[in-house]
């Protein structure tokens, strides 16, 4: 019997990676698959390339090329996931191809290029229509900027991405379940770094338990 597949999504810095790491440590029965884009970005950032030559999404001239590489990487990972599905009953992915579509839309919005009718955009759309639907999509609520050091521009882009993620998932018939932050936005103001970490750790624990309540 094929594994039940779930996906974790959300705007930039919404805490997805922390949730995945918590699941890896405490729930080894769930096959968790990290974000493909993060692996590519880390490889580029650790290379000897000049910053302007790095194929990363925050380099506008490399935005489309980055997503082409990500598409091929994701196809490879999907083939590997098929092997996991024979061994695990539950698979939870950090982002999927639907997120890639939303990011291409974001690139168009940011005027990096016209990506919405590109060859890659069309290939992604076709792949998504053919793939087996996820059991559930979890949309992580944005972490308030009191807990991060984002610039105003980053926060605006993150809000736009969140809007595009909702729009794109709904196009393909999904109604994502919102994963709350589980802390009051002002609760971190005036706290020491250790206290902020404690607030964050407790919030992650509650988010994980919330997600698991939707997984049989």
Image (cartoon, rainbow, N blue to C red):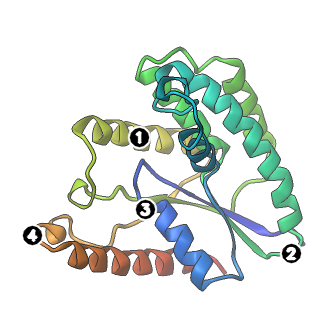
Does the CB distance between marks 2 and 1 fall below 8 Å? no
Residue for point 43% across, 81% down: 205
Mark 2 or mark 1, whichever is nearer to me: 2
Q: Of label 3 and label 2, which has the lower sequence position?
A: 3
Percent across and percent down for residue 72 are 76, 37
Left or right: residue 145 versus residue 174 is: left
Q: CA distance from mark 3 to mark 4?
A: 21 Å
Q: Of label 1 and label 3, which has the lower sequence position?
A: 3
Dot label at residue 15? 3
The residue wearing badge 2 is: 87
Mark 3 or mark 4, whichever is nearer to me: 4
Residue for point 54% across, 33% down: 56
Examine the image and state in which quarter residue 151 appears. Answer: top left
Q: Of label 3 and label 4, which has the lower sequence position?
A: 3
Does the CB distance between marks 4 and 2 fall below 8 Å? no
Left or right: residue 43 versus residue 200 is: right
Q: Is residue 35 above or below residue 40?
A: below
Percent across and percent down for residue 52 are 48, 23
Mark 4 residue element? loop
Mark 2 residue element? loop
Q: Of label 4 and label 1, which has the lower sequence position?
A: 1
Mark 3 residue element? loop
Residue for point 55% across, 30% down: 54
Q: CA distance from mark 4 to mark 1?
A: 31 Å
Percent across and percent down for residue 75 are 79, 43
Q: CA distance from mark 3 to mark 2?
A: 27 Å
Q: Is residue 214 visible?
A: no
The residue wearing badge 1 is: 163
Dot label at residue 190? 4
């Amino acid at each position: 019997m094929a594994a039940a597949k779930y996906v974790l999504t959300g705007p930039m810095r919404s805490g997805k990676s922390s949730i995945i790491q918590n699941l890896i440590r405490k729930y080894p029965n769930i096959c968790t698959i990290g974000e493909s884009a993060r692996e590519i970005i880390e490889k580029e950032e650790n290379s000897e390339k000049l910053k302007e030559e790095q194929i990363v999404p925050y380099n506008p001239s490399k935005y489309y090329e980055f997503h082409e590489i990500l598409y091929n990487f994701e196809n490879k990972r999907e083939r590997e996931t098929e092997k996991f599905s024979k061994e695990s009953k539950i698979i939870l992915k950090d982002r999927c191809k639907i997120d890639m579509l939303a990011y291409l839309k974001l690139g168009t919005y940011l005027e990096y290029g016209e990506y919405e009718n590109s060859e890659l955009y069309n290939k992604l759309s076709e792949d998504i229509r053919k793939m087996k639907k996820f059991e559930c999509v979890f949309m992580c609520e944005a972490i308030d900027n009191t807990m991060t050091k984002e610039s105003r521009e980053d926060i605006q882009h993150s809000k736009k991405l969140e809007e595009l993620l909702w729009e794109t998932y709904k196009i393909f018939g999904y109604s994502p379940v919102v994963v709350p932050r589980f802390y009051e936005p002002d609760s971190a103001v005036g706290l020491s770094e250790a206290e902020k970490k404690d607030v964050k750790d407790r919030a992650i624990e509650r988010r994980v338990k919330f997600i698991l309540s939707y997984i049989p």
